[in-house]
Amino acid sequence: MTLRAPAAAALMLAIAVGACGGRVARPVPATTPSDHLMTCTHIVAEYTTNLERATDIGREMKGQAGQNVGHFMLSGVFLLNLNDSEEQEIRALYARNQELRRLATKKNFEL
């Protein structure tokens, strides 16, 4: 019986620590090797997709903030998402869109 309590405590700690930090950031690169091949249609499509993705990530961040409050109330600091992966991804999307605007200007059209 005494072995079960430490094992249960270790399992709970592993779950709590494993939940820390949120998800891994997956930022998009600002430039790609094929940028010079993009047509105006491709540039507009990617630009629009990036704006939509940034909006989705922003919603995710707002939802995460609410979850952090709930997790803190229930379990203390162990389940909080304290990383900035969403912010990194949004910054990368905006940097990519700046590059797309530069490409559009080079091709004589504005986004």
Image (tube, rainbow, N blue to C red):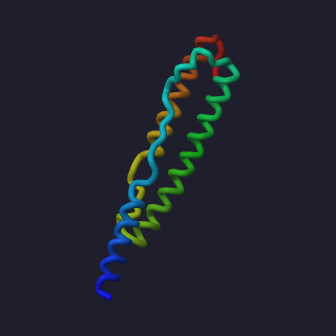
- Name, please, the residue furthest toward the right: 41
Residue at point 39% right, 60% down?
A: 18
Figure quadrant of residue 15: bottom left
Count of picture labels: 0
Q: From the viewer's perspective, tell me whether residue 20 is left or right of residue 99.
A: left
Residue 17 higher or lower than 54, as above or below:
below
Residue at point 59% right, 43% down?
A: 55
Viewer-closest of 20 and 57:
20
Viewer-closest of 18 and 45:
18
Residue 76 lies, in percent from the top left, at 36, 68
Q: From the viewer's perspective, tell me whether residue 58 is left or right of residue 72.
A: right
Viewer-closest of 5 and 55:
5
Residue at point 47% right, 57% down?
A: 65
Residue 36 lies, in percent from the top left, at 58, 15
Residue 44 higher or lower than 86, as above or below:
above
Residue at point 55% right, 46% down?
A: 57
Quarter in which the N terminus is drawn? bottom left
Residue 92 higher or lower than 87, as above or below:
above
Q: From the viewer's perspective, tell me whether residue 12 is left or right of residue 110.
A: left
Q: From the viewer's perspective, tell me whether residue 99 is left or right of residue 18.
A: right
Residue 96 higher or lower than 25, as above or below:
above
Residue 79 lies, in percent from the top left, at 40, 63
Quarter in which the C terminus is drawn? top right
